[in-house]
Image (spheres, grey):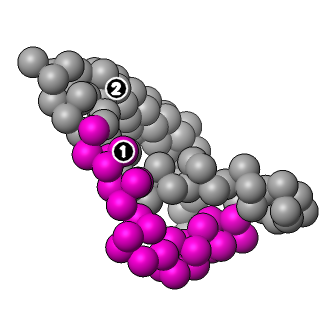
Amino acid sequence: MPRRQKSSSSSSSSSSSVERVTKEKTKEKTKKTKELVQVRPKRTKSSYLFFCDQRRPVIRKENPEWKLPEVSKELGKQWKLLTDEMKEPFKKLAESAKESAKESAK
C-alpha cells in the first residue's frame, strides 16, 4: 500500500498558530516580569562587590589582555586571601549602603 502524504497546508497553519500563541504568552510573561522588576527595589551591594569595584581597575591595568572571566577569578582569589581585618572597610561600606537603602524605602 502506498503511503499518503500529509498535506503541508494544514500542518503549517496549525504550527504557525501555535507559534503565535507561544510568542504572545512569552511577551505577556516578559511584560509582567519587567513590571515586577521596576516595582521591586534593587539589592544592595555586598562587601565583595565593593571590593571588586575598587580592585577591578587595578587588575585590568596590570593585565590588559585578560577577559572578564580571568579578572573575576583573580578578584575571587584576592578576596579569599584577605583577612577579616582587611575586609572590614568593605563590610562597613556594605552596611552603610544597606542602611541607606532601608531609609530610602520608607
Kind of residue sitting beneath label 2: Lys
**Which residue of the protein is positioned furthest toward the front in this rendering?**
85
- Distance in Å between CA atoms under marks 1 and 2: 29 Å
Mark 2 neighbour density, 10 Å: few (under 14) some (14–19) many (20 or more): few
Residue 21 in sight: no
Residue 56, disc: none
Q: Which residue is mark 1?
A: 93
Q: Tell me what residue is drawn at x 26 percent, y 45 percent.
A: 95
Is 34 on the left or on the right of 49, as rendered? left
Is 76 on the left or on the right of 14, as rendered? right
Instruction: Classify residue 98 by image quadrant.
Output: top left
Q: Tell me what residue is drawn at x 52 percent, y 81 percent.
A: 81
Residue 3 in sight: yes
Q: Position of residue 97 (x, y in %)?
A: 30, 37
Q: Tell me what residue is drawn at x 19 percent, y 35 percent.
A: 99
Residue 34, disc: 2
Quadrant, the C terminus: top left
Looking at the rendering, the stretch of residues picked out in magenta corresponds to 69-96
